Image (cartoon, rainbow, N blue to C red):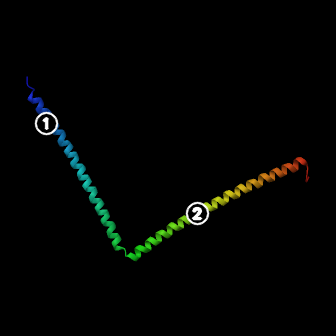
Amino acid sequence: MSPDPINHIIEIKQQLGNLRAHHESERETSRQLRVQQEEIKKSVSDILTRLAAMPDEEHQEHHQFVKTMIREYEQRQQLRAAVINKIATGGAWALVAGLATLVWYGIKHKTGVGE
């Protein structure tokens, strides 16, 4: 017996339907990628237009300003770290001095010296 041609035709139609669905999905993905590419091109074009509108001297001054701001920020961070370090060091020495004073008063009290 030969295979039933109706089942074969139904199977081919299902495969064709799957292929069409996949093709439509790929077409939509391609469309979305084109839209994204156009948005990127527009953004780059806008950036280039803005850069071209800014004179070179002004552009250079802008860069100097940004570099100065970064340098000042770094200096503030260094100063903050130095202050925190000094406070911690001073606190440690104050603790040592306080403990030494307590020990000294404890020894004086135990021995009865200075009463």
| Residue pictured at 16% horizontal, 37% vertical | 15
Residue 23, quarter of the rendered image: top left
Q: Secondary structure at mark 2?
A: helix
Q: Which residue is mark 2?
A: 78
Circle 1 is placed at which residue position? 13
> Viewed as shown, does residue 66 lie left or right of 19?
right
Mark 1 crowd level (few <14, some 14–19, many ≥20, 10 Å Cα): few
- The residue at the far front in this view is 1
Q: Residue furthest top?
A: 1
What amino acid type should be assigned to the residue bearing mark 2? Gln
Horizontal and vertical percent position of residue 98:
77, 54
Residue at the image point whose x is 25% and y is 55% from the top? 34
Up-down: is 108 above or below 40?
above
| Disc number placed over residue 84 in the picture, else none | none
Instruction: Tell me the amino acid under the disc marked 1.
Output: Lys
**Residue 86 lies in quadrant:** bottom right
Left or right, 40 with reference to 88: left
18 relative to 62, above or below: above
**Residue 12, placed above or below residue 61:** above
The image position of residue 96, as x and y in percent, is: 75, 53
Crowd around label 2: few <14 · some 14–19 · many ≥20 (10 Å):
few
Mark 1 residue element: helix
Q: Residue at x 38, y 75 (%)?
A: 56
Say which residue appears at 67% left-offset and 59% top-offset: 87
Which of the image's four quarters has the N terminus?
top left
Q: CA distance from mark 1 to mark 2?
A: 73 Å
